[in-house]
């Protein structure tokens, strides 16, 4: 293992997951497709780089030198920054300027870097300043609740807040679900059925596209000592 990872969920309705980690050696991760956008704090050689990472529709390869540290705040579908539309950041990112060695600039104000432990306090301040909002239409659609909105309206809300259509987001999440089931040791045919694929070939193409691995490769990694 050439990297350290630690993650936690959050009581905040805006946050899906919080991660922190460090490269213990030269580290070249292959990041799978992900329908959520992130706020990333990357520390290297004593300097911090702050960026908004948009959703990924394909595997993205990264390179981290030994000693690089990171803090990632992954947001729930529907959470968005009004001042920085995520629809312009699909498969890309936007670097936020620093104001001091410990603060960054967002929409006319300086914000201190959060820590792994106080992310919720940081998010609460963003919400109070109206820098972070939540779209109830997207939340309801993700939860499969009945909506009076038209499909065109729902599509517009998804593109604005997630950068993706509801269908594209569902495809990525289905691939993630299938991978999780495979890692539990569930047979391929059962995984394909439970995840809603037409057959194993359909599942294999999806996992290769979004995760960069075939079902067999995922199973073999699980079995590796």
Image: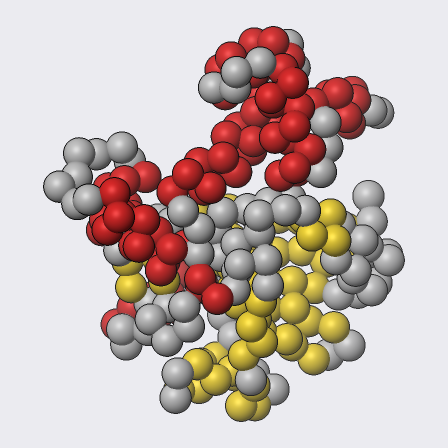
Q: Residue furthest left?
A: 148
In the displayed structure image, the side of residue 84 where residue 32 appears, left or right: right
Q: Residue at x 60, y 45 (%)?
A: 33
Q: Residue at x 65, y 62 (%)?
A: 70
Q: Residue at x 52, y 64 (%)?
A: 89
Q: Residue furthest front?
A: 152
On-image quarter of the C terminus: top right
Q: Position of residue 200 (x, y in %)?
A: 63, 15
Q: Count up the numbered dots.
A: 0
Q: Position of residue 224 (x, y in %)?
A: 82, 24
Q: Position of residue 7 (x, y in %)?
A: 56, 47
In the displayed structure image, the side of residue 55 where residue 122 appears, left or right: left
Is residue 208 at least partly visible in the picture? yes
Judge by depth and name the residue closer to the eye, 40 or 191.
191
Q: Position of residue 198 (x, y in %)?
A: 52, 16
Vertical position of residue 210 compared to residue 12: above or below: above
Vertical position of residue 5 compared to residue 128: above or below: above
Q: Residue at x 77, y 77 (%)?
A: 45
Vertical position of residue 121 compared to residue 35: above or below: below
In the displayed structure image, the side of residue 167 where residue 68 appears, left or right: right
Is residue 218 at least partly visible in the picture? no
Vertical position of residue 119 compared to residue 207: above or below: below
């Amino acid at each position: 293992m050439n990297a350290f990872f630690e993650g936690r969920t959050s009581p905040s309705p805006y946050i899906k997951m919080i991660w922190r980690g460090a490269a213990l050696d030269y580290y070249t991760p292959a990041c799978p497709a992900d329908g959520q956008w992130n706020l990333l704090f990357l520390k290297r050689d004593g300097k911090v780089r702050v960026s908004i990472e948009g959703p990924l529709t394909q595997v993205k390869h990264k390179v981290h030198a030994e000693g690089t540290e990171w803090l990632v705040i992954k947001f729930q579908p529907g959470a968005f920054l009004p001042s920085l539309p995520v629809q312009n950041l699909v498969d890309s990112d936007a670097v936020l300027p620093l104001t001091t060695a410990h603060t960054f600039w967002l929409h006319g104000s300086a914000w201190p870097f959060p820590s792994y432990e106080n992310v919720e306090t940081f998010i609460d301040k963003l919400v109070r300043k109206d820098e972070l909002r939540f779209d109830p239409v997207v939340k309801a659609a993700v939860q499969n609740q009945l909506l009076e909105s038209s499909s065109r309206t729902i599509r517009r809300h998804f593109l604005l807040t997630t950068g993706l259509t509801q269908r594209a987001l569902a495809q990525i999440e289905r691939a993630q679900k299938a991978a999780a089931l495979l890692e539990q040791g569930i047979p391929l045919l059962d995984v394909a059925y439970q995840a809603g694929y037409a057959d194993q070939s359909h599942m294999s193409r999806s996992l290769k596209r979004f995760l960069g691995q075939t079902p067999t490769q995922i199973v073999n990694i699980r079995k590796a000592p």
